[in-house]
Image (cartoon, rainbow, N blue to C red):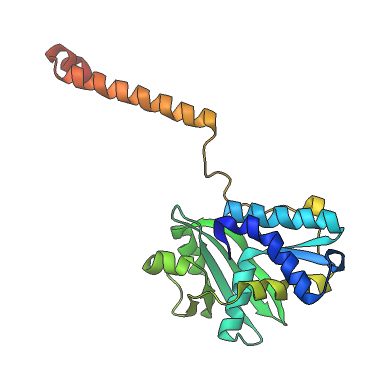
Amino acid sequence: PGGALASTKLLPLLRSLLARAGMEWQDIGAIAYGQGPGAFTGLRTACAVAQGLGFGIGCRLLPIDSLLIVAEDARLQVGLPESGDVAVAMDARMDEAYAAHYRWQGRRWHVVQAPALLTLPALNAAWSALPPRGVAAGSALAAFGGRLSLPAGWQRVLLEGDRAAALLRLAQRAALDSEGVDPADALPLYLRDKVALTTVERAAVKALAREVEGFQSSLKDLQGDPLGAAQLRS
């Protein structure tokens, strides 16, 4: 937890955790972080902190799929058996969702559909091809409610369990499988390329708005003038 203040609280919390465990920074063999997709600021904070520590300590980083963290959390909440499907949809705002489809089989996760940014119609189309039974999780379920359609046999997990513990379980598996990247190669996973305009783009939009306003004013003047109205009709 921490929200907008996470970047100021994270390192002190990590130091406190190591102190309680009787460990030093150099005792760390790998650092896992939620790679994304997700909120820009949260992803940048997670990646930047992990990267800085990785450089300082000299350890590898474990980028973990953020939607898979949600799937792992849901798996433990419902007690998924030896095999099963989990569809994840997180509210990405702007009437879109970050979505993915995973399969738990052989005590491992398998990616059926990699994370993607989807409109609600596209998400519903993807979900129409899901198998008859499974588990759906993520904030989009509550955010969009009845606008999302799941097969009748699918169970919805609306509450968040322990995402940190889910991240840890996935990180342990990744470490055992000798996965990981050099800190220099660590990057967030962005699926939405653009959510804001540059200064130049904002100025262009304002200029266009002024042109449109001037054009609309001219139309009004023409409409009040019989000759102008005839020109307008032509």
Residue 103 image offset from top left, x and y in percent: 64, 75
Rendered position, 92 above or below 89: above
Q: Nearer the viewer, residue 175 or 146?
A: 175
Using the image as rendered, state which of residue 108 and residue 13 is in the foreground.
13
| Residue at image point 69% right, 65% down | 13
Tell me which corner region of the image, top left, top right, bottom left or bottom right, holds residue 55.
Answer: bottom right
Residue at (72%, 65%) from the top-left corner?
A: 14
**Residue 205 makes an appearance in the image:** yes
222 lies above or below 151: above
Query: Which residue occupies 83% across, 61% down?
Result: 60
Q: Residue at x 61, y 61 (%)?
A: 115
Residue 173, horizontal then vertical, whole percent: 77, 74
* Residue 84 vs residue 183, the one in the foreground: 183
Work out which quarter of the rendered image holds the C terminus and state it: top left
Q: In the rendering, at what x and y percent does residue 104 appear?
A: 66, 78
Image height of 119 relative to 100, above or below: above
